[in-house]
Amino acid sequence: MTETPTETLARPSPKISFVSLGCPKALVDSERIISRLRAEGYELTKSHAGADAVVVNTCGFLDSAKAESLEAIGKALGENGKVIVTGCMGAEPDAINAKYPNVFSISGPQAYESVMQAVHQAAPPAHDPFTDLVPPQGIKLTPRHYAYLKISEGCNNTCSFCIIPKLRGRLVSRSAADVLREAEKLVQAGVKELLVISQDTSAYGVDVKYAESMWNDRSVRARFLDLSRELGSLGAWVRLHYVYPYPHVDDVIELMAEGLVLPYLDIPFQHASPRVLKAMKRPGNQDKTLERIVRWREIAPDLAIRSTFIVGFPGETEEDFEMLLDWLGEAKLERVGAFKYEPVSGATSNDLGLPEVPAEEKERRYRRLMEKQQAISARILKNKVGKRLQVIIDEAGPTVASGRSKADAPEIDGKVYVASRRPLRVGDIVSVKIERSDAYDLHGIAV
């Protein structure tokens, strides 16, 4: 029997529960899928049990991440019979099928069409014209005042500890015009901070030979420097993440000195020992990194550098680790994260023939590195006491709000706690006089 238009409109919109795991790149994938879902009239719910289907966007980078993904799938299956799996772990479906053979469908990262096809099969859309509406910037999982802006997919590097290129493929850059149109829509929708991400941000455009595309009234090259400059013209904070230290990164420091781009670089150095870096097959010119950092800070004195390091990589000796500690003492990076090496199935680091570092030694080295960095961070933050900093507010409060300075990315860096006599709203950018500091955070008053 054919449904009448009235019956179609009366049918409630199907509900989808969504789980997003992993890095900001995966979060952007989730935002794109959710935007499609909302555009087609689906409702989102936090309850698996009350949903017509569950989508789980998995992470498959480390074994611990895979375990978290499997746990999320299992929880969803326990509450709902229709579970659609996507994301990095979906690129290798055998492990998922072995544990959960009754999942509804499995697809890899960026497989938006496959996900939507599965959703249509599990819960056909209601096609209600009154609910098939989304804002121009799409649906975001971040707060309204900041958004991740993915400029490319995949990676051409062959780091021995990483399987991301196997999961996400080789580098595929978006056109500069495409990126800038999305950024412009986000800023028009109220976004105050654009967090530029990709697997290898400073390699942007290499695959398309820096092709030009038309944006507004001008042609823009798909080049790291050019894109950064144009993004800086939109009036929002622009924060650069996952920047490998290729030589041309030096040019972007000038944009930071001009105030077009935030004086912030997220560079995954991973280690300092040339022997370990060689075993890791790390890209970028890291031979004279300390000298370059000094030069960068001469050009942009307020530059904050965040990085991550791996301790306990196969073959890492005490001498290698001491070299890393000495390097940190000289580099004086503002923000540092560390990971204990985990062997990842399919990574070439498993087959290097190098001796494993015992688990207890990994733990000792991890603690030593973080203690060293904590002291460095405390000294850097103490030097900010008495200064006035621009702070973007992330959480409002009756008397004290919390936010971030230009040196802090959301969720991974420190916070600035702001006392204020006037109410501060989320997304406000205010001037704050810093009154005290601790190991990772600052405390001040709005002025």
Image: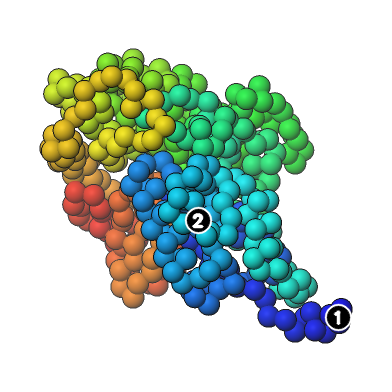
Instruction: Give the residue type at disc 1.
Output: Met
The residue carrying mark 2 is 101
> Tag on residue 77?
none
| Residue 141 visible in the current orientation | no
Q: Do residues under tags 2 and 1 come within 8 Å of each other at their CB atoms?
A: no
The residue carrying mark 1 is 1
Which element type, helix, strand or loop, lies under badge 1? loop
**Location of the C terminus (image quadrant):** bottom left
Left-right relation of 91 to 310: right
Residue 424 screen position, x and y as percent:
41, 68
Residue 352 screen position, x and y as percent:
32, 20
Q: Which residue is drawn at the image coordinates 49% and 51% (left, top)? A: 97
| Residue 381 visible in the current orientation | yes
Mark 2: few/some/many CA within 10 Å (<14, 14-19, 20+): few
> 399 or 68: which is nearer to us?
68
Left-right relation of 318 to 334: left
Q: Earlier in the sequence, mark 2 or mark 1?
A: 1
